[in-house]
Image (cartoon, helix red, strand yellow):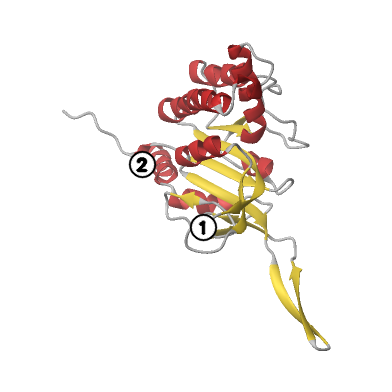
Amino acid sequence: MLNLQTNISKPPRILIYGPQGIGKSTFISKSMNPVLIQTEDGLGNLDIPAYPLSRSYQDVMTAITELATVDHPYNTVAVDSADWLEPLIWKQVALEAGKKSIEDIGYGKGYVLALDLWREYIGALNYLRDEKNMTVIQTAHANIKKFDNPETESYDRYEIKLHKSASALLLEHSDIVMFANFYVGITKESSGFKDRKRAVGSGERILYTEERPAAIAKNRYDLPPEIPFDKDGNYWGVIASHVPFYNQATANTEKDA
């Protein structure tokens, strides 16, 4: 008999990024029974079970190993944030190479070595997903960078605030990459002989799930291109309705009842 399985039986790996204060930690708090691995001190007043602030790459890996080997009630593991994890990885690379910093290893070589630790970290998260049925959430801050599009002129867009190689690795690893931002509209004002364009917004926040010229995003579940990022966490219902794992889990619960 062939020992096969489908991705339907696996929870999603989610990466959410955006500007400071947009609500990435709140997104974690609204997920299913989360436990947090902190690389930055940004929880505020949110009540989420969390490991002590990680001050090294080994602290992060120790937390993941504990979740992999000890029985616990958590359904979601969250790392907040990936871009604060990155300097911990760089510090570990320099330590293993006997250097003071990653730059001392040689031009570009340190960042290549860093990818080995990123892959080790991703492999550990995959174990929690595959063997412990845990949803994986990673947060990151956004950076504005110039994008050289071969089909058009260059333009600025939001990207994940990581070294480009690490960013590509996390993008490939994730099933859902969402860009969170405030909605901005443009209005035109006439003043004499001149027309002025002015940005306006009401504080409404949006989760973008498909790539646009302004930002990187993707999903493997046919999510709506834009989801309201409301304070009550209703977006989780929208996400769950499109992710087979959550639908399967609900069906199994109802069957057992």
Which three-letter amino acid code belongs to the residue tagged 2? Ile
In this view of the protein, can residue 3 be seen by the observer?
yes
Q: Secondary structure at mark 2?
A: helix
Q: Position of residue 227 (x, y in %)?
A: 57, 58
Residue marked by disc 1:
149
- Up-down relation of residue 23 to residue 85 (above or below): below
Q: Position of residue 203 (x, y in %)?
A: 74, 60
The mark tally for this picture is 2
Toward the bottom, the furthest residue is 193
- Up-down relation of residue 249 to residue 181 (above or below): above
Toward the right, the furthest residue is 192
- In this view, the residue in front, 113 or 63, is 113
Q: What numbered label is drawn on residue 8? A: 2
Q: Quadrant of the N terminus?
A: top left
Mark 1 or 2: in front is: 1
Cβ–Cβ under 8 Å for marks 1 and 2:
no
Q: What numbered label is drawn on residue 102? A: none
Report the residue at 62% width, 45% height from top. 17
Toward the left, the furthest residue is 1
Q: Secondary structure at mark 1?
A: loop
Q: Quadrant of the C terminus?
A: top left
Residue 24 appears in which quarter of the rendering?
top right
Which three-letter amino acid code belongs to the residue tagged 1? Asn
In this view of the protein, can residue 234 be seen by the observer?
no
- Up-down relation of residue 166 to residue 89 (above or below): below
Mark 1 packing: few (<14 Cα in 10 Å), some, or many (20+)? few
User: What is the CA distance from the residue labelled 1 to the residue labelled 2?
Assistant: 35 Å
